[in-house]
Amino acid sequence: MDIAPQMHHVRFNFPAPRLDDPGQTLRGSLQEKRPMVPHGGKVGIAVGSRGIHNLKEIVAETAAYIREMGAVPVIIPAMGSHGGATAEGQQAVLAKFGVTEKDVGAAVESSMDTVVLGDTDGGVPIYFDKCASRLDGIVLLNRIKPHTDFHATYESGLVKQMVIGLGNHAGASEVHLHGLSGLKTLVPEMGEKVLEWARILFGVAIIENAVDSTAEIHVLPKNSILEREPLLLQRAKELMPYIPFTGIDLLVVQEMGKNISGVGMDSNITGRRCIRRDLSGDDSGPARIVCLSLSAQSYGNALGVGMADVIPSSLYRAIDFSVTYKNVITSGFLERGFVPIVAGSEKEAIRIGIQCCGRKVDTHTARIVQIKDTLSLREMYVSNSLLEDREMSMDCEIGPEFTWEFSESESLLSRLR
């Protein structure tokens, strides 16, 4: 099969409100609300492992406010089992985001040790970072966004950060042992108890837009976190980008990675969750997914590779299975670590994806979408056959027709930048 589909460069104009100066916006909100900080105390800022735009600036402003209130700020990694489930690994993750003492004006205190704050009504222990438990106060700082595993009242945000992020490896493992029900029901229950038992002061909630820039920042007093977060989650969903096509035969994802999504490829974008006991969301996505590479910023962690159907051998060689399996096993969703069909080259991977899409097509009739990654959706390559049959109200600009090009080693040269 000759791999020569007729493609178009399509640019989508998603609504994307953004803050011109997120630091100034946060500073103004903190000055207006003046959330309580214990004078002379030591206050931790919980920072996770998700890629958040302007993270360094937002953390630095939060630390500056704590100092202004007469307290000493410190950074507490709040990322569950990420960073290889080690204190050094989690500190290294923060350093990659620019969250260091030099850059944000607060020392990083990283430890995987935990204490048990208490139990849920059903007897499930609630683990909490030991360093954080000794502080005079804790500020939660996280992005509010749809989760890649489940949909519920609370998904990714401040509540989950309290329970899983600050629960370290022990807390993350405990919640994930209960599967999807643990994420949907235990997280809210545990979050309510953490708010009651731990010295949570307030939260800094971040919402990003369709092009992954800061859209909104909200300062939430402790007593409003449970009430406000679901409303902010709904706002985050409204601002998410999406692939505005149905009936896709093949989705080509140029790059996956932990810096792009917690599961490498955001399941809210692909429509494929790969959780065997939860079939919701697995029928609306493309028939086949081919992923071409693993980001360097993933450092070998390929959790989510199992959501692809075919990968080239170059991606397979980039996987650090010890790091990947640790993360996958902690999550409990083993399917996301399964190795897809491994093709000899990118061209061969794409050929297999087209051949096995579930209907008889060739490269001229296949309905193909190519994206850089699941964060970068403003620009896509879309096959002529899909554009001709589109039902799309999205404002977009369609470029001239072109044909994919490959190198002598059969790597795809026609790439979105």
Image (spheres, rainbow, N blue to C red):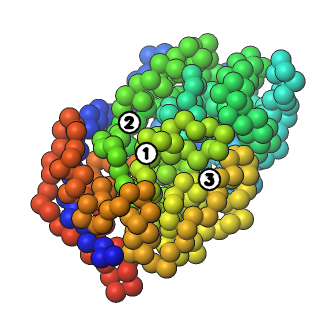
The residue nearer to you, when weighing 399 against 129, is 399
Q: Is residue 102 visible?
A: no
Residue 285: image tag = 1
Q: Earlier in the sequence, mark 2 or mark 1?
A: 2
Q: Residue at x 20, y 50 (%)?
A: 387
Residue 336: image tag = 3
Mark 2 → mark 1, Cα distance in angstroms:
16 Å
Task: State which mark lies toward you, 1 or 3.
Answer: 1
| Residue type beneath disc 1 | Gly
Q: Residue at x 35, y 50 (%)?
A: 248
Query: What residue sits right under mark 2 in the picture?
Result: 240
Q: Quadrant of the N terminus?
A: bottom left
SS at mark 1 in the image:
loop
Q: Earlier in the sequence, mark 1 or mark 3?
A: 1
Q: Residue at x 50, y 75 (%)?
A: 343
Q: Is residue 143 above or below residue 270?
A: above
Task: State which mark lies toward you, 3 or 2.
Answer: 3
